[in-house]
Amino acid sequence: MIHTGAKPCTCSNCSKSFVCKENLAQHQKVHTGEKPFTCSECGKHFPNKRYLLTHRRVHSDQQGFLAHQTNPACERPFSCSECGKQFKSKYNSEYHKKIHTENKKYLCPVCGKSFRKQSCFIVHERTHTGEKPYACPECGRCFSQNASLISHQRLHTGEKPFTCLECGRNFTQRISLVVHQRVHSGDRPYKCQECGKGFTQRIGLVQHQRRHTGEKPFTCSECGKSFTLHDSLVKHLRTHTGEKPYICSECGKRFCQSSQLTAHKRFHHVSQHNLEENMPV
């Protein structure tokens, strides 16, 4: 299908538009609440088959994790004879072996990584040279790939071409939509090998694993205190700088953290309520 940007199919409930009738039909289930696809494992319902198939991985991953606890080899029985990497299916194992057998004639002289396509090699080289030939005409920010520039420009245009058919929410990037859809499907593909807890994003798994390792990679240059999360370090640094970015719209008082501002706003709410209670009738 050639994408012209036209969206002729409009929802009569919310006026949202779609490229084809199939997408409109899927979207309309948001309003009707129809969920005809049922999981045979837990009975959970879904509006389309794709979400059901994605959800089923939750059960297969849980079963695989339990099996792996008693017999680690049963979860990934297919191994690569070259590097030892293991796979769940023979197909994935055979596909992986092409990495070792296929000719990669473009070799990076800096790090030794090789590529089959010259275009991929050229893009990779920019990680060493720092070259960013694609510049945003709006703000001047530069990027190493044209695709990154196109994605960035949506911040200026407000365009959000990727739509969730479950709830209608829009996104500027496809990967953001993919991650969001895991909220509906229940899919948590990133599993902790220590406790089996699953996460929708890799960053969530990385942060969680620090609870097991005790790693605190973010260190304050002022006092040497370390933190597991970058956000925690940012908040801590305000105790040294005195920065108070959160401002009360009622009285102008400033706070270091958003939680402090939220608590302070309750003071205005209570004060206003007491004032109304004591007003003469």
Image: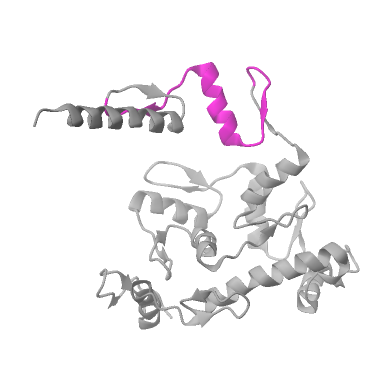
Q: Is residue 85 at all visible to an observer of this figure? A: no
Residue 189: x, y in percent? 65, 62
Q: Residue at x 39, y 41 (%)?
A: 139
Colour scheme used in the picture? Answer: one colour
- How many marks the image carries: the answer is 0
Residue furthest out toward the left: 281
Question: Does residue 135 appear left or right of residue 254 in this picture?
Answer: right
Q: Is residue 100 at all visible to an observer of this figure? A: yes
Vertical comparison of 272 with 117: above or below: above
Vertical comparison of 15 with 252: above or below: below
For the record, the magenta segment spans: 221-250
Residue 57: x, y in percent? 65, 71
* Magenta-span inclusion, residue 193: no
Taking depth in this image into account, of 247 and 137 the one nearest to the observer is: 247
Q: Residue at x 73, y 54 (%)?
A: 192
Q: Quadrant of the N terminus?
A: bottom left
Vertical comparison of 125 with 170: above or below: above
Residue 106: x, y in percent? 74, 60
Q: Quadrant of the C terminus?
A: top left
Question: Does residue 209 appear left or right of residue 255 in this picture?
Answer: right
Question: Does residue 42 appear left or right of residue 37 in this picture?
Answer: right
Vertical comparison of 200 with 272: above or below: below
Residue furthest out toward the right: 81
Residue 30: x, y in percent? 37, 72
Q: Quadrant of residue 272?
A: top left
Q: Quadrant of residue 70?
A: bottom right
